Image (tube, coloured by chain):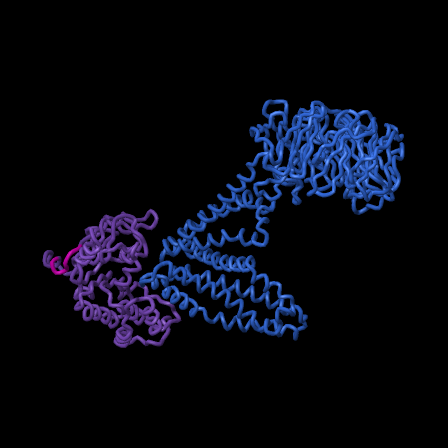
Chain colours: A blue, B purple
Amino acid sequence: MSKLLAVAARELRERWLLFPGALASGFFPLVLPAFGVPRDAAPVVGLFGAVLLGAAAGVVTGSSMLARDAANGRLGFLFSRPVSWPAIWGGKWLAALVLVVTTGLLAAIPWMAVYPPETHGGSWLRAMRDGPGALLFLVFIVLAVGFANFGATLFRSRSPWVALDLVLLLAVFWATRRYVAPLWLYGVLGRLSDWSAAVALLPLALAVLAGSVAQVAVGRTDVQRAHRALSLGFWAVVGFTLAVAAGYWAWVRSASPAEVRVQAVTRDPAGRWAYVEGSRLRHGGWYPQGFLIDTTNGRYAARPDVLLGGPSRIPLGALFSADGRFVAQPHLDHDGRGVALSLFDLTADTPHVTEVALESSPPPTWATAFALSPSATSVFVAHESGASLFALPSGRRVATTTIGPGWQPAVLRFLGEGEARAWGVPGKQARARAEVRGVDLATDGRTRAVTFPIATALDPAAAERGVLPDAGGRRILTRDDGLHLRDGATGELLATLAEGKGRLSTVFLADGRIAVAGGLDGSPANGPQTSLLVFDAAGAKLGEVSLDLWPWRLSVGPEVVPGRIAVSSFRSPFLSEDTLVVDVGEGRVVDRLSGLRPAMGFWSVSAVPEDAGGTGVHFFRDVEGRVVRIDFATGDRKVVAGPGAPRGERISAR
Amino acid sequence: MSAETTTTAAAAGPALETEALTVSYGRTRVIEDLTLAVPRGSVYALLGRNGAGKSSLLRVLLGQRPPARGHVRLLGEDPWTRRTSLMARAGVVPEEPDAPPEMTPRQLSAFCARLHARWDGPAVEARLRRFEVPADRPFARLSKGQKGALMLALALGHGPELLLLDDPTLGLDVVARDAVFQEVIGDLADRGTTVFVSTHDLRAIEGIADHVAILHGGHLALAGPLEALKAERGLSLEQIFASAAGTRAADASRTEVRS
């Protein structure tokens, strides 16, 4: 230890001029007010200067402590004495750390004496005193000194090994983007809270320390050999860290549907296939890994690794074709500049996947909406400034229209295999305009747009709830100062189902009837009572049922069997809710699904409409994120995803 | 074998020995298959022209570089793995004297005193006076001869069993060179200290060395007691050196050499 201290003391003696220099620089912020700089800004300048000086001291010390001494033979002076390499290494590093910390502190003393922390918040001082702040501070110092040493060694050795360093650097960038960035992006590291930044950088600090250990222990006085040792030590730790990160990420991603808390579900009309997305229970942050599950036998395919939707990482869900033969998953293309689809053919024993790049389609945003044609021969994409139809599986754009800017697609429907319609509302820039815009596109290139007035402007942030079309897109319901039934093509008002503002949920039944649940403002809504109104296809009221449900964020539908609909409320994500099954013809509750709500779909994709006809198989979700498949025809129930789901066979889509 | 037996055997063996030693820089071999033994108490001169591999051999002997092949023993121990303890028993004078530039000889002596368990500060001061090295002048401002003398004084400060000198008179004037070698002759030989000196200063070494080895192109050209070699060949050291170098000239031309 005494030798280590002797080495450190000598290092400090060599650089002692830094100390008075730092102290002198600490007076600089004090004279700034004399030059017109606001008095409040002086401590900020002082802090910046102290940090800068400390960093500079780290770089200067790091670049000279080993590489310079090895190159000019001075390291041989120590190595020809009875001083172990740990003492040489430790003494040099100790001196470097003392120099950086002392330089920074000395540069802070003069202005801190004049501007004590309480006069300017001093939050940075408190941050440095707590555990994460102190560790981060130490990590930054080690990185400054260590990388300066690495750079100086690299420069002085001038060995061909530099080329390998550069290759490894590129490899590490690639691996970091692939394996570490997702951990950060999806909040896996965020679980460490205040420690996450320090923990993320700690391996790098350990790598420069390990590298310098190898440099001294193995390289000793030969600068080229020292460079090789430093490189090997550094890259070994970096490589090990990346391997651990990659392994952890692979482990997180290898979870089965039983190990996710499901948030959204879409399904094919027959109820055989379901696509679920949820956050992983394996500490996966909020990485929205999805599974395509054959709910009849539990076999599942994990969603291929794709880029999610743009910088905001929007989960885009999946689109089933009405014939149940295909499912498409929209995602960012490999360049991150457009939309691509993974199109799965579900008719084979193992789903066959085709990657489709959509021609000239902008990257998805929160406003982008998707719909798949009934036989999956085309896909409809609407975004802020326009809408386009793309042929599948070629991805060729067959029809497009420009609408924007400021257009917010609300909902899309295919009117037939080759014809689609989108309804949208003015975006945030023009939200006061009370109108809806309907846009028709056909695969033969025809386009048509119509704008029609409505009673009040719809909220663009909730546009998907403002317009509800029936399965064929012939009729729409608009929630504009009440609830209005309109012609889907022209917007002509057909009937007013309710007037005034309120919380309403609606569904078209397969036979054309309309069910509406909720209460308008002014109606008694403070108790657990909800009214369910039933209208015929023309909008004439047929009856009303009073339900024992809180009228908060009501969900009406699906129509579980002809004439019977599910109705539920949603008070909180943390509260278990029951779903009532109501026979709208008889006007009574026929069943109560305890602790279950209809599973929500993805807001960006248009699911196959509930009123398009089905088999009586429907999916519900509980508060724990389990997905329960209920066959209302047979009464069969089973958990298909989420905690407690059976672990089915994992298959790979080809 | 007990530790005591090992120590005894080591003490009885050569002060320095190499066996089939090869030293490489990458693919370039600077010393190849060198087998050498330096008797204890001898003054052993390693001769060779510039680039013969003398300095590379010294680095391996000092534990600053591992051999590519073969074995090295310094005072019976492996210098790569036992460098720290060996440096407590050996003194080193490098080819290019270098030390922290801001430190004076006196400060350097004090610094070395903290690194060695045994340090004779007054003896170092006395040598510095004898060599006329100013004790309070920073190392950077000393002349080359003064730096060399300082290195020698520091190398002797802990009373080493073995002194390794790497071309210690390179660039020194005649007076400084004589001072270095007089120190070696007068002070060390009488104490039984083994001296291993690499040099190409044949004239200066001839009077003090009792063993010589001639290194040429990374190979050992000749080794043995100096007087015996001279008597056997009826030649002076210079003639022996020229003859040995000439013998190996063809080999040397095929060997890329760094030192």
* B174 and A535: which is toward the camera: A535
Quadrant assignment, res A85: bottom left
The region drawn magenta spans B223-228
Tell me: residue A12, above or below residue B65.
below
- Foreground pick, B4 / A420: B4
The image quarter containing residue A329 is top right
Count of all numbered marks drawn on residues in the image = 0
Task: Say whether residue B31 is visible.
Answer: yes
Residue B111 on image: x %, y %:
35, 70
Image quarter hosting the C terminus of chain A: top right
Left or right of B233? Residue A349 is right
The x, y position of residue B104, in whole percent, is: 36, 73
Query: In this view of the protein, which residue sits in the foreground, A324 or A298?
Result: A298
- In the image, residue B229 above or below residue A527: below
Q: Is residue A129 magenta?
A: no
Give the x, y percent position of residue A440.
80, 31
Q: Residue at position x 80%, y 43% from top?
A: A459
Residue A144 drawn above or below residue A412? below
Q: Is residue B165 left or right of residue A241?
A: left
Residue A555 x, y percent position in the rendering: 76, 36
Q: Is residue B137 above or below residue B233?
A: below
The N terminus of chain A: image quadrant: bottom left
Left or right, residue A150 beside residue A514: left
Q: Is residue A394 visible?
A: no
